[in-house]
Image: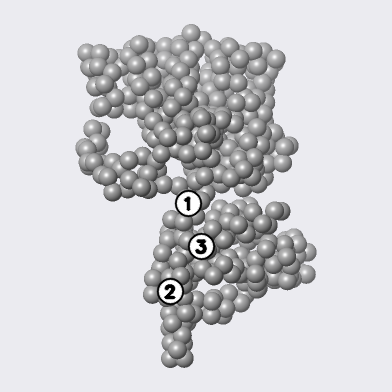
């Protein structure tokens, strides 16, 4: 592990805490799945971003003077026989570059001492249930000693405000891990597509879980720890259910299959969607919708560059999709008016109801404000045409080199009067992962083809 990378991040946090500031960052709790089995442990992203430490039961404390303290599980031969080797407080300073380390069993005793004579306590707000209560307890312990002349912090602030901004722009190390994660996921998509067509050709009963198994195989085969989120493998009409999960539905010759799946590698997510014909050949209507979504993605990709707003790719995609909906008779001129009307009144929402992307990083829907911080105060109000709610728009984030985001337009056609039957129950989404560069963006997930002809060629193989 490159401990200097994490030390440099901690130093950047420390420099932003203000005089007398101190930050407390716990890792994620272990969670019971059932009886005596826990869910697989996954560290907290903030904690890992600042420590590089993957064990449970750990806390990091960063002070404004730059001093960092880790609380971690003590060495314990019996526990280590059952659960695995622990780093332990003695080895932690050397391994992780922290200034001091103690057993987590000493947390409640030592933390009030660390908080004495500080002014502001920073911790991630609304991220860890019960953390606020722990902080209250430590502050109470400090207060109990004011009669000895110690000062008690009188302010609490959200540490996410600092670390979210840091995590939003990925450094070279992070970009490298994200490229490798996306490459593994791309291979997994290829494997699932090819296996799907091969099984159908062999007359086998193909289920969504068969393709899920292919994805998992490829993820683990290349060192990914786990999927970055629950894989979506949706055959036929299931593709129109946005949060569908790989289940046991049969995949039929003639269906479109939508797979939205990405692995997590060393703490970083990838997030890829491909929609492909189960048998390897698009029908006319499937191809028409597919080409439209792809054209909208191309427009969104062209709008993803430094200086553009986060919303620009979405607006570019919506324009192409909405025009295409008119062309394919999914929208009707008499009923929905002009292209501008249909966009303004969000008539396209019937078939495209999500955003075109999100930040991507340690969390699949990564942290980071979608509002441009320097323009936070510029508010314009409008009525949402669908819900009637008042929406306060603030200027969208200006994209900068190193930001990572997904570009994922889609079209989902549910059976409905007035919609050509040939398109019913077709759901298409195409999702790639992009890193903003100095001149545009780098698509890091394109090791899996996206052109209809290339998908067909791949599935013949
Ligand atoms: N897989 C979740 C998403 O695409 O946002
Ligand atoms: Mn996705
Ligand atoms: Mn996504």
Query: How many marks on residues?
Result: 3
**Between 70 and 17, the one nearer to me in the picture:** 17
The Cα atoms of the two marked residues, 3 and 1, are separated by: 15 Å
The answer to whether residue 38 is left or right of residue 169 is right
The residue lying at 69 percent from left, 33 percent from top is 218
Location of residue 199 by image quarter: top right
Looking at marks 2 and 3 on the same chain, the residue that comes earlier in the sequence is marked by 3
Question: For mark 1, does the 10 Å Cα neighbourhood hold few (<14), some (14 to 19), or many (20 or more) residues?
Answer: some
The answer to whether residue 268 is left or right of residue 141 is right
Ligand 1 is within 8 Å of the C-beta of the residue at disc 1: no
Residue 186 percent location from the top left of the image: 63, 29
Question: For mark 3, does the 10 Å Cα neighbourhood hold few (<14), some (14 to 19), or many (20 or more) residues?
Answer: some
Q: Which residue is mark 3?
A: 15
- Indicate the secondary structure of the residue bearing disc 3: helix
Q: Is residue 388 above or below residue 15?
A: above
Question: For mark 2, does the 10 Å Cα neighbourhood hold few (<14), some (14 to 19), or many (20 or more) residues?
Answer: some
The residue lying at 58 percent from left, 12 percent from top is 453
**Between 197 and 398, the one nearer to me in the picture:** 398
Location of residue 345 by image quarter: top left
The answer to whether residue 89 is left or right of residue 357 is right
Q: Which residue is mark 1?
A: 164
The residue lying at 27 percent from left, 14 percent from top is 332
The answer to whether residue 201 is left or right of residue 252 is right
Q: Is residue 226 above or below residue 444?
A: below
Q: Are marks 1 and 2 in contact (CB under 8 Å)?
A: no
């Amino acid at each position: 592990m490159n401990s200097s990378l994490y030390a440099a991040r901690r130093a950047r946090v420390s420099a932003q805490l203000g005089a007398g500031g101190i930050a407390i960052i716990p890792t994620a709790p272990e969670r019971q799945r059932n009886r005596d089995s826990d869910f697989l442990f996954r560290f907290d992203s903030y904690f890992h971003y600042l420590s590089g430490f993957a064990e449970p039961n750990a806390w990091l404390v960063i002070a404004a003077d730059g001093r960092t303290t880790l609380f971690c599980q003590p060495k314990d031969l019996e526990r280590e026989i059952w659960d695995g080797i622990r780093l332990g407080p003695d080895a932690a300073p050397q391994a992780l570059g922290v200034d001091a380390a103690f057993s987590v069993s000493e947390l409640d005793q030592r933390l009030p001492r660390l908080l004495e004579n500080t002014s502001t306590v920073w911790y991630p707000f609304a991220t860890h249930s019960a953390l606020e209560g722990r902080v209250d307890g430590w502050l109470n312990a400090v207060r109990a000693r004011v009669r000895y002349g110690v000062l008690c912090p009188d302010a609490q602030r959200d540490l996410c405000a600092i670390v979210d901004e840091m995590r939003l722009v990925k450094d070279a190390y992070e970009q490298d891990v994200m490229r490798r994660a996306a490459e593994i996921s791309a291979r997994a998509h290829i494997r699932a597509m090819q296996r799907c067509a091969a099984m159908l050709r062999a007359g086998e009963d193909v289920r969504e879980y068969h393709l899920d198994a292919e994805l998992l195989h490829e993820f683990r085969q290349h060192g990914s720890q786990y999927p970055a989120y629950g894989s979506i493998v949706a055959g036929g009409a299931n593709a129109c259910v946005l949060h569908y999960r790989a289940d046991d539905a049969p995949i039929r010759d003639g269906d479109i299959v939508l797979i939205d799946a990405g692995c997590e590698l060393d703490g970083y997510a990838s997030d890829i969607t491909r929609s492909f014909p189960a048998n390897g050949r698009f029908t006319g209507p499937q191809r028409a919708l597919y080409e439209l979504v792809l054209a909208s993605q191309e427009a969104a990709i062209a709008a993803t560059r430094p200086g553009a707003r986060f919303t620009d790719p979405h607006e570019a995609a919506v324009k192409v999709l909405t025009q295409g909906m008119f062309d394919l008779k999914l929208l009707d001129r008499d009923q929905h008016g002009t292209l501008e009307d249909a966009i303004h009144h969000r008539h396209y929402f019937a078939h495209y109801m999500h955003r075109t992307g999100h930040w991507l990083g340690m969390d699949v829907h990564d942290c980071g404000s979608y509002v441009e911080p320097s323009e936070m105060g510029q508010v314009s109000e409008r009525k949402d045409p669908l819900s009637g709610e008042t929406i306060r728009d603030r200027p969208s984030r200006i994209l900068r080199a190193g930001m990572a985001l997904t570009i994922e337009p889609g079209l989902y056609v549910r059976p409905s009067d007035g919609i050509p039957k040939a398109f019913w129950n077709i759901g298409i989404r195409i999702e790639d992962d992009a890193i903003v560069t100095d001149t545009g963006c780098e698509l890091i997930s394109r090791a899996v083809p996206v052109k209809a002809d290339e998908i067909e060629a791949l599935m013949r193989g």
